[in-house]
């Protein structure tokens, strides 16, 4: 059955618009909040909106300006039309074929989704496997599943460049090429804070984002930044839930003089493929690099009754523990709804410094996928004991 591309894209637009309207309606109920749509920038230390000074000097300010797709400086990128993830979502119809350059979360999510919508997809990445930085078991499984879905996955590609072709765009690489109607550059995202002319307010930038203190104060008095607006190592945490984690704390810092310093050691990350790749804390390799004597526990999802009953048997729960302290260092949940299950391992890291005793003492409902967490914890602590 042929996929109705325009109907799919209209639904995407509707979902995005409903989400935007939901949050704007929440703000509209607060008499102290004004929604201003005009472009803003700093002039002589003041935040000016559409030519009118809106925020006086010294007003507590939180910059949550987000990020936009980054364009990698590939050969030919200036002469060949391409789309970003943002632009792809605004298309009125599905592409007739798509080549993707990049192997991160955005790339694999779009590759699988569009291929399952019957779009021919080629994915070209420099690494040996997609999702650099995640556990090798998850990376290998994602690559296998993408190929099973029909994605042409080109790995270890060098000399990547773009050029026009009779059918659209050609992605060339050493030893081969891929042609498609459109090419998606999924090569990361970059902060948009430079558009504000932050230097006019004394805000220093680093690697394209704001330089901040541990309390997320910028170099301008009274001005803070959160989320994707921040520079440096924080670029690893380009997730919506990072900004929502930081927002309330930074608001108190700005308005009440508090000194909250958001932590990131237990910050969850999820790639929304099918199955999902959900992880928190250190990977096995990172834990060893940090000098830990590591114990690894792996629980296969197919061993769970509900997984077999509903036909979702792909995946695993992987725990990384310190052998001496028996504390959790990191975890990966790779399975259907893995992101929903991850909180049960994020809480011990975030609240209990990796102590798994509360998980072990908790009764998990049966049959559920989440009981795989309890079984993995029980097995790990039993072996270490």
Image (tube, rainbow, N blue to C red):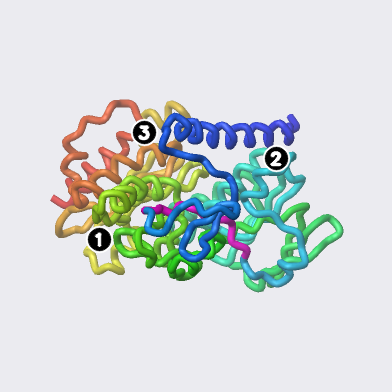
SS type, badge 3:
loop
**Given contact means CB atoms under 8 Å apart, are the residues at marks 1 and 3 in contact?**
no
Q: Which mark is residue 294?
A: 1
Residue 99: within the magenta? no
Please provide percent x and percent y for residue 326.
Answer: 17, 53
Q: Residues under labels 3 and 2: Cα distance?
A: 30 Å
SS type, badge 1:
strand
* x 73%, y 36%: residue: 5
Q: Callout 3 environment at 10 Å: few (<14), some (14 to 19), or many (20+)?
A: many
Q: In which quarter of the image is the N terminus?
A: top right
* x 74%, y 48%: residue: 97
Q: Residues under labels 2 and 1: Cα distance?
A: 43 Å
Q: In which quarter of the image is residue 92?
A: top right
- In the rendered image, the vertical position of residue 305 relative to residue 55, given as above or below: above
Q: Name the residue under label 3.
A: 369
Query: Would you say 126 lies left or right of 343 here?
Result: right
Q: Give the range drawn in magenta.
A: 60-71
Please provide percent x and percent y for residue 287.
Answer: 29, 63
* x 46%, y 64%: residue: 45
* x 32%, y 64%: residue: 213
Query: Would you say 367 lies left or right of 193 here?
Result: left
SS type, badge 2:
loop
Q: Mark 2 points at which residue?
A: 118
């Amino acid at each position: 059955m042929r996929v109705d591309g325009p109907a799919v894209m209209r639904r995407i637009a509707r979902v995005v618009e409903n989400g935007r309207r939901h949050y704007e309606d929440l703000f509209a109920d607060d008499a102290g909040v004004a929604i201003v749509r005009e472009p803003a920038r700093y002039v002589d230390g003041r935040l000016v909106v559409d030519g009118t000074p809106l925020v006086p000097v010294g007003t507590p300010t939180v910059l949550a300006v987000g990020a936009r797709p980054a364009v990698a400086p590939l050969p030919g990128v200036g002469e060949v039309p391409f789309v970003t993830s943002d632009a792809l979502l605004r298309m009125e119809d599905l592409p007739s074929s798509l080549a993707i350059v990049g192997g991160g979360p955005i790339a694999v999510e779009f590759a699988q989704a569009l291929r399952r919508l019957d779009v021919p997809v080629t994915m070209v990445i420099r690494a040996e496997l997609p999702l650099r930085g995640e556990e090798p078991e998850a990376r290998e499984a994602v690559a296998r599943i993408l190929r099973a879905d029909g994605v042409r996955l080109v790995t270890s590609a060098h000399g990547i460049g773009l050029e026009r072709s009779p059918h659209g765009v050609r992605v060339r690489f050493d030893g081969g090429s891929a042609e498609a109607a459109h090419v998606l550059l999924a090569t990361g995202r970059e902060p948009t804070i430079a558009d504000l002319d932050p230097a006019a307010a004394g805000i220093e930038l680093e690697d394209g984002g704001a330089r901040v203190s541990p309390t997320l104060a910028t170099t301008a008095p009274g001005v803070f930044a959160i989320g994707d607006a921040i520079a440096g190592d924080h670029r690893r945490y380009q997730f919506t839930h990072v900004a929502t984690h930081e927002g309330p704390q930074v608001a108190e810092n700005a308005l009440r003089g508090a000194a909250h310093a958001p932590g990131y050691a237990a910050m969850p990350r999820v790639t929304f493929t099918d199955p999902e790749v959900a992880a928190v804390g250190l990977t096995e390799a990172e834990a060893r690099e940090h000098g830990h004597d590591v114990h690894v526990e792996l629980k296969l999802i197919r061993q769970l009754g509900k997984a077999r009953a509903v036909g979702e048997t792909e995946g695993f729960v992987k725990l990384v523990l310190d052998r001496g302290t028996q504390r959790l260092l990191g975890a990966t949940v790779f399975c259907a709804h893995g992101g929903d299950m991850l909180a049960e391992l994020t809480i011990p890291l975030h609240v209990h410094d990796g102590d798994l005793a509360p998980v072990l003492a908790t009764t998990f409902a049966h049959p559920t996928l989440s009981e795989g967490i309890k079984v993995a914890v029980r097995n790990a602590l039993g072996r270490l004991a």
